[in-house]
């Protein structure tokens, strides 16, 4: 069986984890945590990074720092992993669901239209049904980049905080345009990263958050450590969280980050081979990445052609399974999930289409060219 995605530990992972154990620094303090934060900040050209327990925690901390609270509105995508949305509800705020564009990321045209037509500005505050619209969570789906030029313009106009969910896009950057050289997660007010087992680098479970100012990052780090002002005498001036990354996780993370450029190179190389092999396959199209960006090409998606492929996503996944290839459906739309069934969804169209057409195919960094050829052949076989 060729798996969808497995982690790759070819570097210093064991060495660093052993060092952490030998030093008996395994919990939420230790040198590897600071080292990971510094190395990641250097990599991203960011002012600072706070390492935390998960990507979900990173998004939660961002929304808290952004001042999102009970009764506020936060604009979110519907085509995403649910972790991008749940923190909105943790805070008692209401999500409004947006459609995607052909990159699978948030549709900036509809975002603008929603702000213009469905909301009103009163005293400089954008309001929807009387509730203040505080923020927008933008997900860079599968290593792509959302249309950040337009989204940032809209956010500036309406004074919305932008939380970039860059959990899938570590290492992706703009190669052209206003944000040339800027990495995913460093354009909006906040950037969230995940080191879950299936992400481009992993700490088992873990995450990180960045922002434009060091003080903002420091505040989120403070919140992640139970908002402890004085470690010795247990003084707390805010409600904090147990969200700090452990030194054991960070030891893995430091080793993985050393390998990130090589992982990206392999992801890109493997993608190019899939592209070549699938170009003459009429029944599926390998999805591209936004023009003018250098994507980490984390996850590969094929879109089933509505006419030429006679099978549904489910049937394709099952047929591939029979052939020894693991694949996966894209997420079910979040506005259709039970906890969000009563939330507002604004003109969802393309997300419906893609959620019924996209299949993700094997993308591990240790895939061989032979395996990729095998997968491409089987895709053609089962969709033909
Ligand atoms: C993985 C992921 C998250 C959450 O990351 P965790 O570390 O698993 O909490 C959030 N959003 C998206 C789009 C993801 O893929």
Image: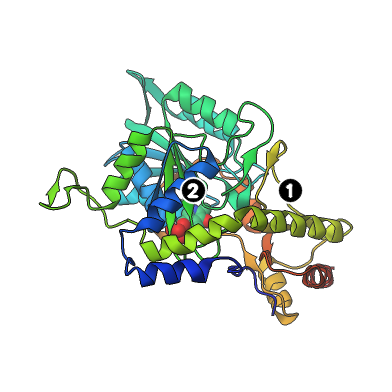
Category of crowding for the residue at label 2, using alpha-carbon neighbours closer than 10 angstroms: few (below 14), some (14–19), many (at least 20): some
Residue 153 in the image: state x and y as whole percent: 53, 25
Q: Is residue 141 left or right of residue 82?
A: right
- Residue beneath disc 1: 288
Q: CA distance from mark 2 to mark 1?
A: 30 Å
Pair 2/1: label in front: 2
In this rendered view, identify the residue nearer to me: 44 or 153: 44
Residue under the image location 54 percent in, 44 percent down: 43
First in sequence: mark 2 or mark 1? Answer: 2
- Residue beneath disc 2: 39
- Is residue 332 visible to the viewer in this orientation of the structure? no
Question: CB atoms at circles 2 and 1 under 8 Å apart?
Answer: no
Category of crowding for the residue at label 1, using alpha-carbon neighbours closer than 10 angstroms: few (below 14), some (14–19), many (at least 20): some
In this rendered view, identify the residue nearer to me: 170 or 112: 170
Residue 19 in the image: state x and y as whole percent: 42, 68
Q: Is residue 10 above or below residue 105?
A: below
Circle 1 — which element?
Answer: loop
Label 2 lies in ligand 1 vicinity (Cβ under 8 Å): no
């Amino acid at each position: 069986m060729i798996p969808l995605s497995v982690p790759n530990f070819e570097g210093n992972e064991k060495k660093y984890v052993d060092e952490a154990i030998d030093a008996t620094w395994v919990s939420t303090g230790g040198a590897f945590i600071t080292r990971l934060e510094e190395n990641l900040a250097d990599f991203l050209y960011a002012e600072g990074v706070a390492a935390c327990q998960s990507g979900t925690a990173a998004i939660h901390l961002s929304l808290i720092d952004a001042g999102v609270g009970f009764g506020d509105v936060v604009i979110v995508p519907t085509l995403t992993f649910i972790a991008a949305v749940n923190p909105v509800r943790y805070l008692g705020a209401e999500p409004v669901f947006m459609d995607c564009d052909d990159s699978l990321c948030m549709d900036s045209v509809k975002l603008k239209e929603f702000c213009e037509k469905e909301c009103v500005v009163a005293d400089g505050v954008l309001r929807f049904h009387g509730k203040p619209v505080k923020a927008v969570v933008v997900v860079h789906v599968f290593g792509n980049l959302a249309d950040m030029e337009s989204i940032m313009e809209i956010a500036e106009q309406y004074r919305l905080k932008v939380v970039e969910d860059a959990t899938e896009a570590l290492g992706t950057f703009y190669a052209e345009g206003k944000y040339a050289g800027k990495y995913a997660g460093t354009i909006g007010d906040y950037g969230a990263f995940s080191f879950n087992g299936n992400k481009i680098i992993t700490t088992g479970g873990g995450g990180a958050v960045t922002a434009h100012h060091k003080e903002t990052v420091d505040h989120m780090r403070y919140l992640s450590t139970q908002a402890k002002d004085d470690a010795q005498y247990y003084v707390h001036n805010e409600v904090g969280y147990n969200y700090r990354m452990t030194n054991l996780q960070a030891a893995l993370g430091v080793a993985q980050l050393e390998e990130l450029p090589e992982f990206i190179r392999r992801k890109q190389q493997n993608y190019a081979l899939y592209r070549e092999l699938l170009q003459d396959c009429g029944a599926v199209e390998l999805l591209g990445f936004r023009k003018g960006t250098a994507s980490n090409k984390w996850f590969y998606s094929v879109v089933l052609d509505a006419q030429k492929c006679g099978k549904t996503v489910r049937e394709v996944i099952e047929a591939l399974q029979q052939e020894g290839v693991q694949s996966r459906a894209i997420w079910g739309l979040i506005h259709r999930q039970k906890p969000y069934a009563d939330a507002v969804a604004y003109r969802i169209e393309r997300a419906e289409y893609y959620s019924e057409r996209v299949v993700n195919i094997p993308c591990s960094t240790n895939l061989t060219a032979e395996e990729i050829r095998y997968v491409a052949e089987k895709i053609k076989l089962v969709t033909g």
